[in-house]
Image (cartoon, grey):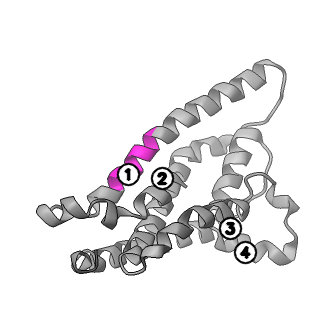
Amino acid sequence: SKCLGSTSDTFYANAGIFGKVYFPRLAVPVSVVITNLITFALQFALFLGILGMFYVKGFRFQPNWMILLTPLLILQMAALGLGTGIIISSLTTKYRDFTYLIGFGTQLWMYATPIIYPMSQIPQKWMWVFYANPMAPIVEIFRYAFLGTGSVSGPQVLSSVGVTLLLLVLGVILFSRIEKTFMDTV
């Protein structure tokens, strides 16, 4: 969420720098993602501390081998935030009002992701929506890996990785095309 919001205004927020000296423009959104990964690491450490506290207090959960996938899941989240953010950043050079929809869209995306409810609560006829949402399997794998509850299938994971890679590639292509002419529209 933070990566998406921060990278979505890359061109406008850095127009002064981009107009003065040339450097790879993609470095700016990548630096935003790296900064947010550091913040995520601190929050994740807090999560592990609280999880340990619950374990000491007697709450039992079954973490499993999927904990080893945590770095890959974090990398996928970073790629998803970067890809989606640079697509939106590229679109906002022409459609400036699009930035106002980012916060609202991110909140809707949170409710379309099984964060506050388990994926098992979703009716079968709506599962196709969650196959299209690349964050849904990531959240379910985190839930399954650390708490031992949750349900995720191989096709969901493959779909999530595929959508993430598609968004990242489309974002990089669109960003590289827009960066050549964005100073005319900004």
Residue indicated by mark 4: 129
Judge the density around disc 2: few (<14), some (14-19), many (≥20) Cα neighbours within 10 Å.
few
> Is 29 situated left or right of 136 in this image?
left
Residue indicated by mark 2: 75
Dot in front, 4 or 3: 4
Q: Amino acid at mark 3?
A: Gln
Instruction: Kindly identify which numbered label has been placed on residue 32.
Output: 1
Judge the density around disc 4: few (<14), some (14-19), many (≥20) Cα neighbours within 10 Å.
few
Q: Which residue: 49% across, 74% down?
A: 98
Residue indicated by mark 3: 156
Tag 4 near tag 2, CB within 8 Å: no
> Is 106 situated left or right of 124 in this image?
left
Q: Amino acid at mark 2?
A: Leu
Q: Which residue: 68% across, 70% down?
A: 155
Q: Earlier in the sequence, mark 3 or mark 1?
A: 1
Point out the image quarter for the N terminus.
bottom right
Q: Amino acid at mark 4?
A: Val
Point out the image quarter for the C terminus.
bottom left
Q: Secondary structure at mark 1?
A: helix
How far, Cα to Cα, is label 3 from label 1? Answer: 28 Å
Magenta: main secondary structure equals helix
Tag 1 near tag 4, CB within 8 Å: no
Task: Examine the image and state in which quarter residue 60 appears.
Answer: top right
Q: Earlier in the sequence, mark 2 or mark 3?
A: 2
Give the image location of residue 127, x and y in percent: 78, 73
Task: Examine the image and state in which quarter residue 86 appears.
Answer: bottom left
